[in-house]
Image (cartoon, rainbow, N blue to C red):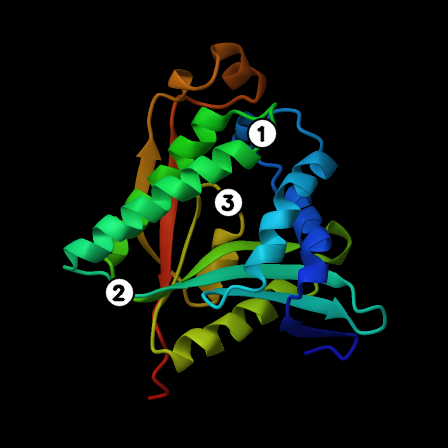
């Protein structure tokens, strides 16, 4: 690892910077359909309080690559551990209640200009795909991975992934992520050991998005998500 930056766990004081990294990286056409013309600074301000809380939660794992001199976060990986709930009806019911609460809080916190219905439908689709692939088994969910535009191509994302893998391997659990099917980062994920584990398509986006917006962003009627899994390394 280069000596001019190091990987550490995030602190609450990193929340604004982390939120800014996420906001700057969410620039795909589908993201624009979700958030429209929301200014990145406005989006970051909306996310920052939740990120600050997450840095204190035991089930969350947020790692950052820091500048060796300033200590500023230059790249970030946001993860969460999920315990197994397979065949546990009570756990499933409890998880549904938690999901409903999370959806309510998300809708309330989203910028007013965003397409809240589309964002929530997308969020629920991600949950369906994860359940379809993992079937409730214990795992580490890689929720977000972002690098400051000025520092991309320096290997920070790869080193963050390796750090995450070490945490998952210690717990003998797979690492799960989902991404858009045309995301160039899929090549990085495959190189780092992830495998394609399934897809889920959000059909008929015109239910949530006016046709003129789909045309403006040259987006088709459907959106396909790819699930990727990296199996734990047992050292053998």
Disc 2 or 3, which lies upstream in sequence? Answer: 2
Of 100 and 188, nearer the camera is: 100
Disc 3 or 1, which lies upstream in sequence? Answer: 1
In this figure, which residue is indicated by the disc labeled 2? 84
Could one spot residue 53 in this view of the protein? yes
The residue sitting at 26% across, 54% down in the picture is: 133
Badge nearest the viewer, 2 or 3: 2
Q: Quadrant of the C terminus?
A: bottom left
Question: What is the residue that sits farthest to the bottom in this orientation?
Answer: 236
Q: Quadrant of residue 8?
A: bottom right
- Please determine whether, in this image, residue 114 is positioned above or below residue 144: above
Instruction: Give how far across and how far down residue 18 sits, in percent.
Output: 67, 54
Of 187 and 75, nearer the camera is: 75
In this figure, which residue is indicated by the disc labeled 3? 183
Of 204 and 10, nearer the camera is: 10
Could one spot residue 155 in this view of the protein? no
Q: Quadrant of the N terminus?
A: bottom right
Instruction: Give how far across and how far down residue 45 sits, in percent.
Output: 69, 41
In this figure, which residue is indicated by the disc labeled 1? 35
């Amino acid at each position: 690892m280069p000596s001019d930056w190091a990987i550490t766990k995030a602190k609450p004081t990193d929340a604004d910077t982390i939120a800014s990294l996420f906001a700057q990286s969410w620039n795909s056409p589908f993201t624009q359909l979700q958030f429209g013309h929301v200014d990145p600074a406005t989006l970051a301000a909306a996310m920052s309080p939740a990120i600050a809380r997450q840095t204190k939660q035991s089930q969350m794992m947020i790692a950052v690559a820091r500048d060796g001199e300033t200590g500023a976060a230059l790249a970030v990986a946001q993860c969460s551990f999920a315990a197994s709930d397979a065949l546990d009806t009570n756990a499933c019911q409890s998880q549904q209640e938690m999901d409903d609460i999370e959806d309510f809080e998300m809708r309330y916190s989203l910028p007013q200009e965003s397409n809240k219905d589309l964002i929530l439908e997308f969020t629920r689709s991600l949950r369906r795909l994860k359940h379809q692939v993992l079937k409730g088994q214990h795992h580490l969910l890689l929720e977000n991975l972002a690098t400051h535009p000025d520092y991309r191509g320096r290997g920070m994302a790869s080193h963050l992934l390796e750090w995450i893998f070490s945490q998952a391997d210690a717990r003998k659990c797979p690492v799960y992520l989902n991404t858009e099917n045309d995301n160039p980062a899929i090549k990085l994920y495959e190189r780092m050991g992830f495998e394609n584990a399934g897809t889920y398509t959000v059909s008929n986006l015109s239910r949530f998005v006016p046709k003129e917006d789909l045309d403006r962003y040259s987006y088709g009627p459907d959106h396909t998500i790819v699930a990727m899994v990296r199996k734990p390394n047992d050292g053998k």
